[in-house]
Image (cartoon, rainbow, N blue to C red):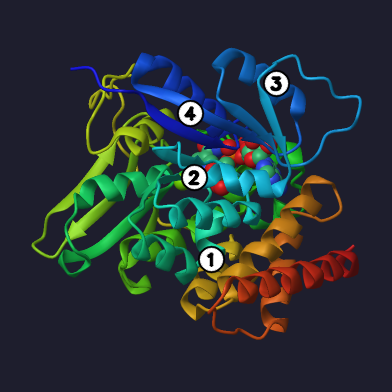
């Protein structure tokens, strides 16, 4: 059977998920074609990738300097508006949102608003946008397929069964590089230490989030929103080898898990093609050689970002957006050596206690909360310095 290739808009092509997506697409031959590829500011990287993949056009969200001379002679578009237009491009069959941070919210809403199938890696947009994103999804013909490995696992284990049949979602966490480090040593942690993740190679922001466990809190909120399961039925277990990507426990006593060696290419491919399963190159899971599979409880007292995030999720309204924004500022400050590692939860807690939670009824509510939390977080970083 031959069918015409599916048109893909890839937002954040130069990042870790973006490049993995390009490898997945490249390996699938004629099945997919690139409508558009985008990047934030690294024009040279986008130029190189465009020459290799030849999309219809590329978008650079931030205008480059006048000295920038692209080698790729295809169409270049510039600016935030062009990015949102690409997310809603009618020529696309599916949109991959691999942007990092709150900056991806506009694109998530645009893609769902245009009725596209959205393969969502950019969890921050779902966490911050909350019901706005869910409404855009429910109102339109669009689909939201998670790329995050835990949520891809849960989506696959659920296989369309409704939330009332679920008794528990159990998300796995690698535990990050400081799983066994005593908390009195956390003050010595440098960005280089936190950037060395034991099982996954990822962009800087999510790597720091994995070290503080903020990533797992964002993922609990993400699971709550995507699968409509209440917080009290969502748990996290530490699984250092990252082979089991998550479990779904059903009310009849069956627990279903999805497994595979840690590679984002597997959930990316599933988000592009699922429920169909396409041929893929992967490393086999060998139950004997890869065993025993080890699980342990999360030491949440060592990682205050986890409880802070889950509490923000439970509080709802603008609190998840505030948590996310404060975390983005704190992570940036830590990477720039302006904040210590234990300073990250201090900043975020300070911001959350100073903000008044409000309901979210429009994008302006989210924008205001994001702005306020960033302002408070910057003040807090200076105070702690
Ligand atoms: P990354 O930093 O490697 O890449 C981010 C991409 O977004 C780049 O192409 C960058 O140019 C672009 N970008 C950044 N800021 C922008 C802005 N303001 N406007 C427009 N474009 C901008 O990030 P990543 O590790 O690939 O992660 C992307 C998303 O996927 C994140 O939300 C992350 O939490 C999620 N995720 C990543 C992994 C992983 O393995 N990397 C796994 C699960 C989920
Ligand atoms: Mg994940």
Q: CA distance from mark 4 to mark 1?
A: 24 Å
The image shows residue 38, relative to residue 113, as above or below, that is: above
Q: Which residue is mark 1?
A: 129
The mark closer to the camera, 2 or 3, is 3
Mark found first going from the N terminus, 4 or 1: 4
Residue with the most extreme left position: 252
- Judge depth for marks 3 and 1 and give the one in front: 3
Who is closer to the viewer here, 87 or 371?
87
> How far, Cα to Cα, is label 2 from label 1?
14 Å
For disc 4, the neighbor class at 10 Å (few under 14, some 14 to 19, many from 20) is many
Cα distance, mark 3 to mark 1? 31 Å
Judged from the image, the secondary structure of the residue bearing numbered disc 1 is helix
Which residue is denoted by mark 4 in the rendering?
21
Task: Read off the residue under disc 2.
Answer: 121
The answer to whether any part of residue 239 appears in the image is no
- The answer to whether residue 280 is above or below residue 206 is above
Distance from the alpha carbon under mark 4 to that under mark 3 = 17 Å
- CB of residue at label 2: within 8 Å of ligand 1? yes
Location of residue 195 by image quarter: top right
Q: Residue at point 43% right, 22% down? A: 25
User: Which of the two labelled residues, at mark 2 and mark 3, occupies the earlier sequence position?
Assistant: 3
Label 2 with label 1: CB-CB less than 8 Å: no
4 or 3: tag closer to the N-terminus: 4
Residue 383 vs 270, above or below: the answer is below
Badge 2 marks a residue whose secondary structure is: loop
Is the Cβ of the residue at disc 4 closer than 8 Å to that at disc 3? Answer: no
Q: Earlier in the sequence, mark 2 or mark 1?
A: 2
Ligand 1, image quadrant it occupies: top right
User: Tags 3 and 1 in contact by the CB under 8 Å rule?
Assistant: no
Q: Position of residue 141 (x, y in %)?
A: 32, 55
Q: Position of residue 196 (x, y in %)?
A: 64, 34
Kindly identify which residue carries mark 3.
47
């Amino acid at each position: 059977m031959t069918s015409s290739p599916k048109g893909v808009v890839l937002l954040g092509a130069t990042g870790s998920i973006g490049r993995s997506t390009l490898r997945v697409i490249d390996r699938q031959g004629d099945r997919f074609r690139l409508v558009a590829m985008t990047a934030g500011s690294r024009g040279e990287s986008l130029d190189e990738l465009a020459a290799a993949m030849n999309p219809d056009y590329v978008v650079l969200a931030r205008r480059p300097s006048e000295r920038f001379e692209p080698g790729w002679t295809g169409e270049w578009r510039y600016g935030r508006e062009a990015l949102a237009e690409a997310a809603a491009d009618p020529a696309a069959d599916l949109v991959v949102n691999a942007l990092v941070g709150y900056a991806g919210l506009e694109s998530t809403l645009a893609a769902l608003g245009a009725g596209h199938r959205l393969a969502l890696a950019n969890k921050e947009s779902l966490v911050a946008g909350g019901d706005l994103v869910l409404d855009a999804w429910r109102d339109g013909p669009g689909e939201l397929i998670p790329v995050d490995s835990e949520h891809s696992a849960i989506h696959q284990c659920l296989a369309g069964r409704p939330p009332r049949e679920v008794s528990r979602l159990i998300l796995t966490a690698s535990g990050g590089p400081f799983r066994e480090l005593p908390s009195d040593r956390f003050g010595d942690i440098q960005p280089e230490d936190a950037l060395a993740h034991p099982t996954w190679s990822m962009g800087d922001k999510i790597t720091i989030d994995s070290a503080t466990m903020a990533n797992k809190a964002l993922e609990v909120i993400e699971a709550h929103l995507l699968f409509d399961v209440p917080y009290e039925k969502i748990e996290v277990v530490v699984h250092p080898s990252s082979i089991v990507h998550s479990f779904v426990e059903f009310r009849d006593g069956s627990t279903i898990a999805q497994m595979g060696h840690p590679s984002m290419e597997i959930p990316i491919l599933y988000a592009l093609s699922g429920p169909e399963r396409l041929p893929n190159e992967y490393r086999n899971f060998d139950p004997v050689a890869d065993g025993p599979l080890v699980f342990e409880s999360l030491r949440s007292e060592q990682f205050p970002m986890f409880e802070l995030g889950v509490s923000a999720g439970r509080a709802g309204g603008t609190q998840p957006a505030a948590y996310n924004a404060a975390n983005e500022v704190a992570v940036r400050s830590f990477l720039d050596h302006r904040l210590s590692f234990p300073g990250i939860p201090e900043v975020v807690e300070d911001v959350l206690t100073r903000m008044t939670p409000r309901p979210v009824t429009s994008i302006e509510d989210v924008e205001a909360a994001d702005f306020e939390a960033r302002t408070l977080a910057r003040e807090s970083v200076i105070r702690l310095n």
